[in-house]
Amino acid sequence: MIAKIVIPLLLMILVPDIYIYLNHIRAKTRLPLRLLWWLPSLSMVIYTVCMGCMRDFAPRDNAILNVYLFLLGLTVVPKLVFAMFSSAGLALQKVFRMRRNYGMAMGVFLAAGSLYVLFYGSFIGFGKLDVRHIDYYSDTLPASFDGYRIVQFSDAHVGTYGRSRTGLLSRAVDSINARQPDMIVFTGDLQNMHPGEIRPHIPVLNRLKAHDGVFSVLGNHDYADYIAAPQSVKEANERETVELQTRMGWTLLRNENRAIFRGTDSIVIAGMENDGDGKHFPRKGDIGKTLAGVSDSAFVVMLEHDPTSWRNRILPHSNAALTLSGHTHAMQFELFGWSPVAFKYSEWGGMYYENTRAINVSTGLGGFIPFRFGVPGEIVVITLHKGTKQLH
């Protein structure tokens, strides 16, 4: 992950320091303090180069990455924010011959704001849990399933919890069970990089209970693409990830489907493998195989980790009424209802409709990085209703 952006990171570390040193440090401090000024930057440069030399997507010990990112937010981002606004203010001061550089005050304020975001997101936001409720209406839903309750959770990334945060995962499992769901669905990214992260959490995840069981699909992190290893090792890791979900009693759907019955009525729960862009994220989805044997008139709930597949493949090539996805995390940052992830994804968090068909994109329970600001971890309670759709 860091290897791909080493140069931008080094510039982000050094350029603000050079600007601040030349404009605010060099002429106003003694030599020992001037030398001391460069110590944090030198440390971050060394840390960054070491991180960039790693072959895997991230270190096996997630703490190494987490500490690095926290230090980046603590020592680099505030200076970057200050330098950007101070330099812009300096330019405006010269152009309009103003007495003061008002950009400095704005830079100090926003730099302090970035520290607030860092500490809140790391120590408070990541520990929050929301329960979001959705009512989905469809004329094609069989009458016996009116009021059917599905609880969705996504992007657990259990490797991030470690021992110190196991309580957060246990609390989420208890909250899911408390909804007394007819069905529980998990829409991908159970691990960060390897199945060894899952094993310590099996006793907690094994407590998930629903009348019709727990259904899941794989997300991009559940494949073995994030480690530098021989193909045989990657294949073994992927097999173990699958086996661990089976051991927990989950029904993992890999381009397949199951029918759920209430008397003579039935609905179909289908699960497609990760259907990403094929470059950055695996493209293993097969819509034809996923819905093999399913009639066009069936009410289908589709599980697919990557929400881009909804418009690319699910809407044009199936009759699935409701799709449940995850993947985006809303970038684990949201301010006044907006997230930067909106630049990349048209459906990134919440419920979206195309006529009577819909997709719910969960913003996830956990994350590769233990940070959330404005986007608490969530579980989603979806109640199905027979009837015409509501106004949205």
Image (tube, rainbow, N blue to C red):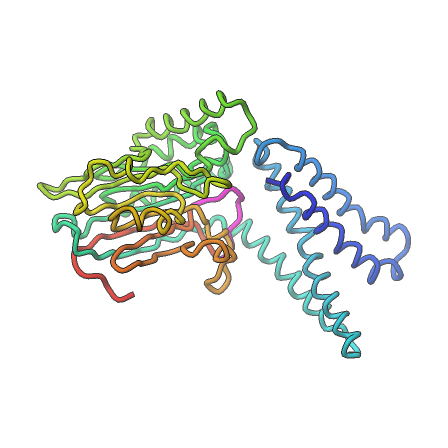
Q: Position of residue 195 (x, y in %)?
A: 45, 29
Kindly identify the residue that appears in the image at 51 percent across and 52 percent down.
Answer: 124
User: In terms of depth relative to the viewer, which is nearer, 288 or 53?
Assistant: 288
Q: Position of residue 140 (x, y in %)?
A: 17, 52
Q: Where, quadrant-wise, is the C terminus in this rendering?
A: bottom left
Q: Is residue 269 left or right of residue 77?
A: left
Q: Is residue 355 left or right of residue 235?
A: left
User: In terms of depth relative to the viewer, which is nearer, 21 or 91?
Assistant: 91
Kindly identify the residue that appears in the image at 33 percent across and 37 percent down.
Answer: 286
Determine the residue located farthest toward the left in the rendered image. 264
User: In terms of depth relative to the viewer, which is nearer, 4 or 381?
Assistant: 4
Q: Position of residue 10 (x, y in %)?
A: 72, 46
**Magenta-tinted stretch:** 365-374
Look at the picture and state if 73 lies above or below 84: above
User: In terms of depth relative to the viewer, which is nearer, 7 or 392?
Assistant: 7
Is 116 contained in the magenta span? Answer: no
